[in-house]
Image (cartoon, rainbow, N blue to C red):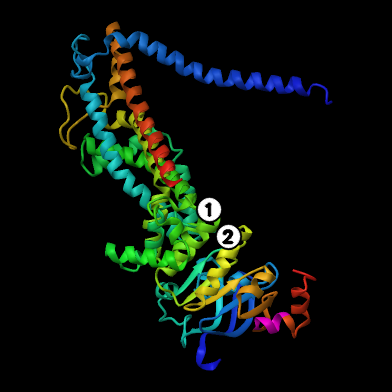
Amino acid sequence: MIPGRKVKEHALFIICSIATLLSIAGLIILLLDAFADGLPWLDFQFLNSLPSHYPDKAGIKAALIGSVWIVGLTALFSFPIGVAAALYLEEYAPRNWFTSFINVNIANLAGVPSIVYGLLGIGLFVESLTLGRSILAGALTMTLLILPIIIVASREAIRSVPKAYREGAYALGATRWQVTREIVLPSALPGILTGTILALSRAIGEAAPMITIAALAYINFVPTSPFDRFTVMPIQIYNWVSNPIREFHHLAAAGIIVLLGVLLSMNSIAIYIRYRYQKRVR
Amino acid sequence: MIGNVKIDVRDLNVWFGQNHVLKDITLKIKRNTVTAVMGPSGCGKTTFIRALNRMNELIEGSRTTGEIYIDGKNIYDKETDVYELRKKVGMVFQKPNPFPKSIFDNIAFAPRIHGITDPKTLQEIVERSLKEAALWNEVKDRLKDSALDLSGGQQQRLCIARALAIKPEILLLDEPCSALDPSATAKVETLIRKLAENYTVIIVTHNMQQAARVSDYAAFLYAGKLIEYGGTRQIFENPQNVLTEKYITGKFG
């Protein structure tokens, strides 16, 4: 018997359990607080109303639709570019100093603070390309922000496709593109989709880059085209929180619930896709 | 042998980086025979057969010199279409590697990438290939099931059927039975003998009994060199080289 071995085992178990509980506790307190404040205000009228100076009439519709526009366009831009870049880096790029240089930079880009992307978006899309403070400028900025995440996740997924599949296809006379399209992409797709959805759900929660593009504007209309001005949920929530009238704080809580709802549904879709493909491949 | 030569290898050398894996291999392989390539681990057996369909090129840092003539054409010529070459020279790997697709789609994969799209033709190819690989009766009612649900032995026969689907002329088998149990091995060996009626088969094997059972000719490689090559019976009963004799009698390997 080694003395104290069981005690140590027990102690570690307790420490790890407490660590887990602490991290969950944070989420639970946040949820409880948001629900207590916001739930009474969360109704159809809230979802279907534009912002207003009167808390009773104010709603999240403009911001919700704005967020949907931003995420939709961001997905449209970032998914093809991200997947194509990942495919190039994994399947086509020669292993040389230039590829390593790109690799290091993509890893670094994934760590750049989002406000920096916001400033880049202002300079590049809003001003230089004269897109104005539009949804398009916002979506392009978000695309830059999440591209590194999508590329890194897609590369992981592509790399995890067994080499034996590729060899089997090459040995049958497949070209590189045929191997990529028929073997690599279908096998990597669940991982790529999961990574993309998680990246998009990060985009939907980001306020910093959108503050620079959308500004803290009072948007009392629903955007109908990519060139319209817009606001997104995190900014709307921030606006309400910073309003001195107490009722608006409850609206902010209701907005948080909506934002969390959207986030959780996106993550569930990611989990569902992974689950379904895993079952199909097995 | 002259008129019947299918593969003519001359001064084949392969390097992986600084590693000289195959040294001056020269041999001729006869049409519609089974040739066993034997030798201890790391002697270059697999590299040798992968030179025959230019699969070594996929490994970064590999370099090949010499010539390999198949039906009189040097496959290392600049004009050779490597995709057509691999269509003509099928390969089955050591570990069964069916694609994560249905049984049908596994077999139809190669015909499809080579331009066959007609569903009826594909159906016929799948049936013919599975029959040829002695797998049809076991899977005919579940062609839509995932190939990954098959047993190891069935998966390996599926991989053989997959290679046969584009009617190759040469079939390279890289230790096809090393991951299989004895009864599955027996099935695959019977199949190999039957395939020799229509195909030129080259099989890499560790297993001396297997080489003796299935092959007409045998090549013994050691440290990247071809030590001895001849009829299987002659190699086993009357080896000319002392290394071959030692290997065959199990003194090393």
Q: Secondary structure at mark 2?
A: helix
Mark 2 lies on residue: B184
Name which residue lies at 37% across and 40% down: A196
Q: Is residue B232 magenta?
A: yes
Mark 1 lies on residue: B151
A91 or B173: nearer the viewer? B173
- When asked about the image quadrant of residue B209, the answer is bottom right
- Separation (CA) of disc 2 from disc 1: 9 Å
Q: Are marks 2 and 1 in contact (CB under 8 Å)?
A: yes
Name which residue lies at 26% across and 37% down: A72
Residue type beneath disc 1: Ser
| Lateral position of residue A136 relative to residue B136, left or right | left
Task: Please provide the residue range marked out in magenta.
Answer: B231-236
Seen from this angle, which residue lies furthest bottom?
B2
Q: Secondary structure at mark 1?
A: loop
Residue type beneath disc 2: Ala
* Position of residue A156 measured from the top left corner of the image (x, y, whole percent): 47, 46
- When asked about the image quadrant of residue B127, the answer is bottom left
**Chain letter for the residue marked with disc 1 in the picture:** B
* Position of residue A179 measured from the top left corner of the image (x, y, whole percent): 40, 60
Query: Badge 1 local density, few (<14 within 10 Å), some, or many (20+)?
Result: few
* Position of residue A220 measured from the top left corner of the image (x, y, whole percent): 17, 21
